[in-house]
Image (cartoon, rainbow, N blue to C red):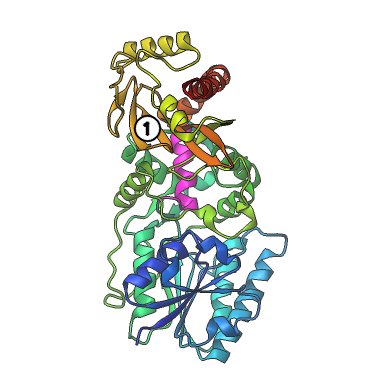
């Protein structure tokens, strides 16, 4: 009979990747979720059982018939008493697991030696492991440091800092050693601990083969990303508070979370007690390989989960949140309604470019095309074919998506420090047609951001006129 596994934190970064791995391993999975609707978009949703609840509340239904319970939740930085809340929740979880006869609890905590003066974050992670052990079940506690993977808080914080800043004024902690581990290897350890028939319990420290300082890690990332060498200037007066505000400004990691992470960077997080050979069949990849995998997934938009998926107050979405398609996405979204039917609006949209032009700001388009030619790009000289198709060039764009009467998406091939898309989506409701025009731009480094803000005033003139022109053309066609 398939093993029944309860996964907490399934909407978070690690949990969202663990669940499909467990399903592939043949486990029967139940997810505990504070907000079950957050799991509806997961591709594996129909293959799992979901129970609404919290680790600090009643768990009898969630624990019923469970063989292994996985604890992947935390309350980092959520209020002044968040560390106390973590201990209380872990004790509650342990009590219900004991009452239900759960045989094993698997927990992912943080590295760091108890003899050291640990940050509040790392200290709380260790105390949670102690509280879970009170269940009487076999508790397997993994302790990991920096987790490298597309969308992880550690990786995104590092990636943005190195991408954006060629020169960084840094605190002393950049010389602190750490032992990063790939998210792929973390998942491999968790799956094996959950599914093994061995009798296992205890604390297991996990990390990759490389012990590096944060400065060395930044330098290696720049090499893998093909960036010029970054210059780090270490100063003694940068406190965790000041550093966290800087991180919150430059990266997508909120300052409230960044402060907890930065304070933990003061502690050396390396594996002091390696796992004995033969206990787990996992060979962690090198830091370079971890960076290469994470960057490839980010560049291709294959980010299965990200750190802001977690059900935490840090990540309550607002209209200004970045889209997670590989980093911050700057956008300009405009809508218009018309009585013209969708097929006429689609015809107007797909007639854009070439000799017809772009409905507004023709002089500006020609100037941009000339600048692109000078920079070695295609400019506007390619024109367009009469009938558009996916993969066909359209001036200095290329058709990336085309759905009759519903959508046209173009990907820019002009020279610029970033990636850009123009998309038109068409919807019909109650006899009217809504056209949504979206310009997305994913900047590369500091130059990419400066480029976007430099051309933003021209967008304010071109994009509204382009939308009005398309609607007018559609209504004229009708």
Is residue 141 in the magenta section?
A: no
Residue at x 41% of width, y 73% of height = 204
Residue at image mark 1? 229
Query: Can you say which quadrant of the picture contains the N terminus?
Result: bottom left
Location of residue 37 (image quadrant): bottom right
Residue 440 position, x and y percent, is 48, 33
Q: Nearer the viewer, residue 195 or 42?
A: 42
Location of residue 62 (image quadrant): bottom right
Residue 242 position, x and y percent, is 64, 42
Is residue 161 in the magenta section?
A: yes
Residue at x 36% of width, y 83% of height = 2
Q: Is residue 206 visible?
A: no
**Range shown magenta:** 150-166
Determine the residue located farthest toward the right in the rendered image: 80
On screen, residue 23 above or below 389: below
Q: Nearer the viewer, residue 435 or 260?
A: 435
Q: Is residue 49 visible?
A: yes
Location of residue 26 (image quadrant): bottom left
Residue at x 31% of width, y 78% of height = 279
Q: Nearer the viewer, residue 117 or 281?
A: 281
């Amino acid at each position: 009979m398939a093993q029944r596994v309860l996964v907490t934190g399934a909407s978070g970064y690690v949990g969202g990747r663990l669940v499909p791995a467990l399903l592939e391993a043949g486990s029967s999975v139940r997810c505990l979720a504070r907000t079950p609707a957050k799991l509806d978009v997961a591709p594996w949703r129909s293959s799992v059982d979901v129970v609404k609840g919290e680790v600090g509340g009643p768990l009898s239904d969630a624990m019923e018939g469970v063989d292994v319970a996985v604890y992947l939740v935390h309350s980092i930085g959520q209020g002044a008493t968040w560390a106390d809340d973590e201990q209380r929740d872990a004790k509650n979880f342990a009590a219900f697991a004991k009452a239900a006869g759960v045989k094993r609890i698997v927990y992912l905590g943080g590295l760091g030696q108890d003899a050291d003066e640990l940050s509040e974050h790392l200290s709380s992670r260790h105390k949670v492991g102690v509280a879970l052990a009170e269940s009487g079940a076999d508790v397997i506690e993994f302790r990991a440091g920096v987790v490298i993977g597309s969308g992880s808080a550690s990786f995104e914080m590092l990636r943005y800092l190195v991408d954006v800043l060629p020169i960084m004024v840094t605190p002393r902690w950049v010389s602190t050693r750490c032992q990063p581990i790939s998210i792929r290897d973390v998942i491999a350890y968790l799956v094996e601990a959950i599914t093994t028939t061995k009798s296992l319990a205890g604390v297991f420290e996990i990390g990759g083969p490389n012990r590096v300082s944060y400065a060395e890690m930044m330098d290696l990332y720049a090499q893998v990303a093909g960036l010029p060498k970054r210059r780090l200037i270490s100063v003694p007066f940068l406190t965790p508070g000041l550093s966290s505000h800087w991180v919150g400004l430059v990266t997508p990691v909120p300052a409230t979370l960044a402060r907890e992470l930065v304070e933990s960077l003061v502690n050396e997080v390396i594996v002091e007690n390696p796992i004995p050979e033969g206990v787990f069949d996992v060979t962690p990849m090198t830091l370079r390989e971890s960076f290469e995998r994470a960057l490839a997934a980010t560049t291709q938009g294959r980010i299965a989960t990200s750190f802001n998926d977690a059900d935490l107050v840090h990540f309550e979405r607002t209209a200004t949140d970045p889209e997670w398609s590989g980093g911050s996405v700057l956008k300009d979204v405009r809508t218009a309604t018309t009585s013209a039917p969708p097929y006429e609006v689609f015809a107007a949209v797909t007639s854009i470019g070439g000799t017809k032009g772009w409905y507004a700001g023709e002089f500006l388009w020609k100037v941009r095309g000339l600048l692109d030619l000078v920079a070695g790009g295609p400019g506007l000289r390619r024109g367009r074919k009469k009938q558009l198709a996916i993969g066909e060039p359209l001036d200095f764009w290329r058709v990336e998506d085309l759905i009759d009467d519903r959508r046209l998406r173009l990907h820019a091939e002009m020279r610029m420090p970033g990636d850009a898309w123009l998309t038109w989506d068409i919807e019909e409701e109650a006899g009217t047609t809504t056209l949504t025009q979206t310009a997305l731009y994913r900047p590369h480094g500091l130059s990419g951001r400066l480029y976007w803000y430099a051309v933003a005033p021209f967008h304010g003139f071109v994009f509204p006129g382009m939308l009005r022109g398309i609607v007018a053309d559609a209504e004229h066609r009708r």
